[in-house]
Image (cartoon, helix red, strand yellow):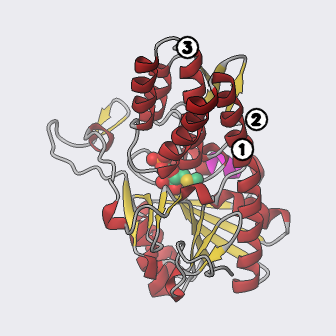
Amino acid sequence: MRTIDWQDGLIVAIDQTRLPHEVEFLRIGTVDELIAAIRSLAIRGAPAIGVAGALGVALAARLHPDDPARLRRVVDAIRAARPTAVNLAWGVDRVRARLDAEGAEAALAEALAVLEEDVRCCRALSERGARWLVETVGPQVAVQTHCNAGALATVEWGTALGVVRSLQEHGALTHVYASETRPLLQGARLTVWELAQIGAPHTLVVDSAAASVLAAGLVDAVVVGADRITANGDVINKVGTYPLALAAARAGVPMVVAAPESTVDLATATGRDVHIEVRAPEEITALGAAAVAPAGTETLNYAFDVTPADLVTAIVTESRVILPADGGRPDDPTGRA
Ligand SMILES: CSC[C@H]1O[C@H](OP(=O)(O)O)[C@H](O)[C@@H]1O
C-alpha cells in the first residue's frame, strides 16, 4: 500500500487526517484539492509532500495546457502550500524545469521518477542508518522517535521508521518509544498505527515524558526525520525535536536524523534562515470538536523547531553519514562516513 501514487491521471493518497480509525484514499484531480490536502496534512511529511508537489506540477500541466500564465500561478501556489519542508519546493522545481524544457509528458515522467526515487532513497538510508546504529550502540537497539517519519511521511517505507523497520528486519530492534506529538498527534495517531502494522514492540508517551524516558536509560538512540537540513547541519523538524535533542545530549544518547538528500538544503546557511510554519490556534485549543482552552486563547503554534548542529550526532541519508556534533557539515563533500 503506497501513501501517495499516480493512478489514471489522478494523485491518489491516504487521507492521514482519518487515521488511525479509517484508511481512506483521496483521488485528487485538481490543484485546489491538492493544496487543501497538503495544508490540512491529509498529505504530510517532508518526502511525501515533495512527491505531492512533483505530481502536482504534472497534474497542473495537464489541466492547463494552453494557459501558461495560469499554469505558472497554480504551480507557484502548490510550491507555497507549506513553507518549511524544503522537499515541496524541491519537488515542484525539479518537475517545473522538465515542463518548461520539454512539455507536459516529460513533466509527468520526471514526477514519476521522483516518486520511485523516494522509495529507493528511503530503503537505502534506512539500511545505512540501521547499520550505523548497530555499529555505534550495539547489536540490540531501543529507539525513541518523535512525530511520524514513517511510510506515511514518504511513498512507502519511511525515514526514521524506515531505520526502525531495517533494524527489525535484522533482528536488532528491541523497542520503540513514540511521543504523541501534540497538537496534531502524528505520533499517537500515525507512528503507533504504523508500528502496530509491522509488529514492532512500542510504547506511547506524552511529549513531556520523552526526556524522562531518556533519563531513565530506556533507549539507546533517538531517531527522527527532518523537514529541512541546512548547510551547517542544523535540523528543522517537528516541534519538540529540539528539547528531545537536549535531553539526548544530557543522557549521552546519540541523536540521529534520517532523511533523504532531497531534504538537505545547501542554499540555506543555518536554521535561523528557515521560515518556521505557525499554524492555527484551534489545533492547540481544541481536540476535534472539544475545546481544551477558553475560546479566544492566544497561542503560538510552531509546527517545527530548529535543532542546532552541535546537538545532532548523525545525519543519515541514502548516500552518506554526516557527523555534525563532530564538526561534519552537509556542505562538506569530504564529510562522509
Ligand atoms: C520523513 S520526515 C517527516 C517530517 O514531517 C513531519 O511534519 P508534518 O507532519 O507537519 O508534515 C515531521 O516534521 C516529520 O519529522
Q: Residue at x 75, y 59 (%)?
A: 165
Sequence-first tag of 2 and 1: 2
Which numbered dot is residue 1? 2
Q: Residue at x 54, y 57 (%)?
A: 263
Looking at the image, the residue that sits furthest to the front is 101
Q: Mark yes or no: residue 24 visible.
A: no
Sequence-first tag of 1 and 3: 3
Q: Are marks 1 and 3 in contact (CB under 8 Å)?
A: no
- The amino acid marked with disc number 1 is Glu
Looking at the image, the residue that sits furthest to the right is 170
- The amino acid marked with disc number 3 is Pro
Mark pair 2, 1: CA separation: 7 Å
Give the labeled residue for mark 3: 65
Q: Tell me: 241 left or right of 261.
A: left
In the picture shown, does residue 112 fall above or below 210?
Answer: above
Q: Secondary structure at mark 2?
A: loop
Q: Are marks 2 and 1 in contact (CB under 8 Å)?
A: yes
Q: Secondary structure at mark 1?
A: loop
Q: Tell me: 337 left or right of 72.
A: right
Measuring from the top left, give residue 317's x and y in whole percent.
Answer: 65, 65
Picture quadrant of residue 270: bottom left
Which numbered dot is residue 120? none
Give the labeled residue for mark 1: 156
Q: Residue at x 55, y 29 (%)?
A: 57
Overall secondary structure of the magenta stretch? helix
Q: Secondary structure at mark 3?
A: loop
In the picture shown, does residue 80 fall above or below 320?
Answer: above
